[in-house]
Amino acid sequence: MGKLLIVGTVAIDEIETPFGKTGRVLGGAATFIGLAASQFQVESGIVSVVGDDLPDAYLDSLRAKNIDLEGVEIVKGGKTFYWKGKYHNDLNSRDTLITELNTLADFQPKVPDHFKDAEVVMLGNLHPSVQLSVINQMEKPPKLIVLDTMNFWMDNTLQELKEVIKHIDVITINDEEARQLTEEYSLVKAAAAIQEMGPKYVVIKKGEHGALLFHDENVFFAPALPLEEVFDPTGAGDTFAGGFTGYLAATDNLSFKNMKNAVIHGSNLASFCVERFGTERMKDLKKEEVSRRLLEFKALTQFDIELK
Ligand code: AMP
């Protein structure tokens, strides 16, 4: 069983979509990554920080999935990272209404000793200096370091972000962010420019239009499953990242061929995440549901053209 170290927010979210609103619910990049990765045979652990306002039941729901939380610091009297977002009618775009860093503002991540040899490190969306500090704490060079980020960090901490990007193997980023980072409109050119910055693999997420994996001259495309019900896209990108890294840690095979499968697993799991608000769908997701939908994915993309 491979070890997967996850760094990212464990958050309190409030979400508004055209279908309704949540109150304060469990969210955060590390939460969604951990829940997705728990679908695979991996030993995963989260490094994060929360305040003591976070209900115990939220952390218990992660422990119930065998996610190690020794690296989650609980600050007495502190407040948990809080994010409020509102989706537009097309559900593909959203406005961030509030981001309160709270305890995250002076977070010094501490990787537990038993995760310093993790084969795969998933650096979820967080301050790039925190992401770099985690890389520096690893005792054995990980086989794979994957980083996710967003426009918030490009706007506020671009130099630090460019520094950490030099040290990673895979970046997962959405199309608009890839354009912002590289100032290239073509995603093919953007992916090439990002590979020049460090990561040899670039995954560009395109929401309901799927994801592209770039490596040297190779490109692979995974569609997103056309769904009848999309309720709340929050966490879809993180769920993708959790599926991608969980599968790679479990299979211990970093070939391009296996990475293509990892992209499919990530897309498959993300298709569940969006069907309910917050973490609702992911927390009770059954293995059989996941396997059944993988077959749908296969059918969606398989065709048999005779080449003359
Ligand atoms: P996604 O929909 O994949 O972008 O992820 C949404 C999750 O990211 C939410 O649960 C938020 O708590 C978290 N989040 C939002 N803004 C930030 C930020 N600036 N840094 C880290 N996590 C964030």
Image: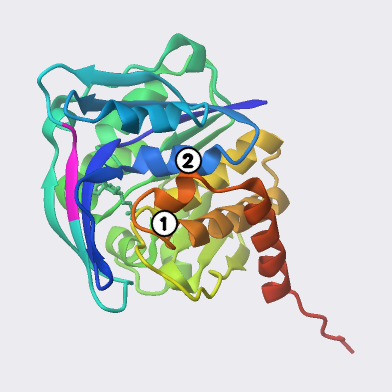
Say whether mark 1 is within 8 Å of ligand 1.
yes
Q: Nearer the viewer, mark 1 or mark 2?
A: 2
**Mark 1 to mark 2 CA distance (whole Å):** 12 Å
Disc 1 marks a residue whose amino acid type is: Ala
Quadrant holding the C terminus = bottom right
Residue at the spot of label 1: 236
Q: Which residues are the magenta region?
A: 80-84
User: Taking 147 as reference, is 219 above or below it?
Assistant: below
As rendered, which of 39 and 137 lies closer to the eye?
A: 39
Secondary structure of the residue carrying tag 2 is: helix
**Please, what is the three-letter code of the amino acid marked with disc 2?**
Leu
- Left or right side of 157 for 263: right
**Residue holding disc 2:** 35
Q: State which quarter of the image contains the N terminus.
A: top right
Q: Is residue 165 visible?
A: no
Name which residue lies at 18% across and 23% down. 52
- Most frequent secondary structure within the magenta stretch: strand
Q: Earlier in the sequence, mark 1 or mark 2?
A: 2
